[in-house]
Image (tube, grey):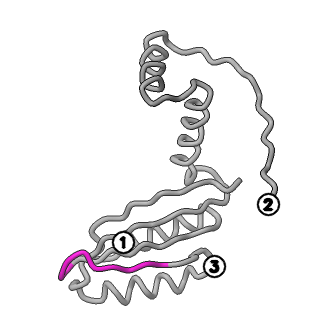
Amino acid sequence: MRRRVERYVRFSVSTPEELLKKFDETISGLGLERSKAIRMAMERFLTENSLKVDRKIFGNINIVYNHEVREVDSRLTDIQHHYLDIIVSTLHFHISKETCMLVITVRGENERIKSLLSSISSIRGVEDVKSCFFTEV
């Protein structure tokens, strides 16, 4: 398998001196070079803001819910069937007698994924929803 060769661009950044000092101390403690740390920070910024711009993304939606709440399981299943075009896989496991976790792996347009998130969050019995997304390259 051939590895993609990336072309690097040199650019300058203006920042407060104290911020740079703290940044350099932190990356030194982690054994990172400044350029690599800045690339990592840029990637994190893109990931955290992936739902705010129109693009294809992929990642996981983690749902913690009380399965003893009436119809929560069936509502979660029904919603998944409405989003088969973006759902890649699911994983269900039991946290306790009452609490379950559902992990849904998704890939697609961010607007469609936001719609799925909204549908899940509105279900009675869903206690927490956390997600982690990446932008497609």
Q: Name the residue nearer the viewer: 119 or 99.
A: 99
Considering only vertical position in the picture, is 62 above or below 124?
above
Residue at coordinates 47% horizontally, 82% vertically from top-left? 79
Considering only vertical position in the picture, is 74 above or below 57?
below
Q: Which residue lies under the disc numbered 3?
A: 85
Compute the Cα span from label 3 to label 2. 29 Å
Q: Which residue lies under the disc numbered 1?
A: 122
Considering only vertical position in the picture, is 39 above or below 124?
above
Q: Picture coordinates of residue 131 (x, y %)?
A: 44, 60
Rendering quarter of residue 36: top right
Give, as a three-letter code, the residue at label 2.
Met
Asked whether the beta carbons under mark 2 and mark 1 sit within 8 Å of each other, the answer is: no
Q: Element type at marker 3?
A: loop
Compute the Cα span from label 2 to label 1. 44 Å
Residue at coordinates 47% horizontally, 26% vertically from top-left? 27
Q: Element type at marker 1?
A: loop
> Which quadrant holds the N terminus?
bottom right
* Residue 96 part of the magenta-drawn span: yes
Q: Which residues are magenta?
A: 90-98
* Closer to the eye: label 1 or 3: 3
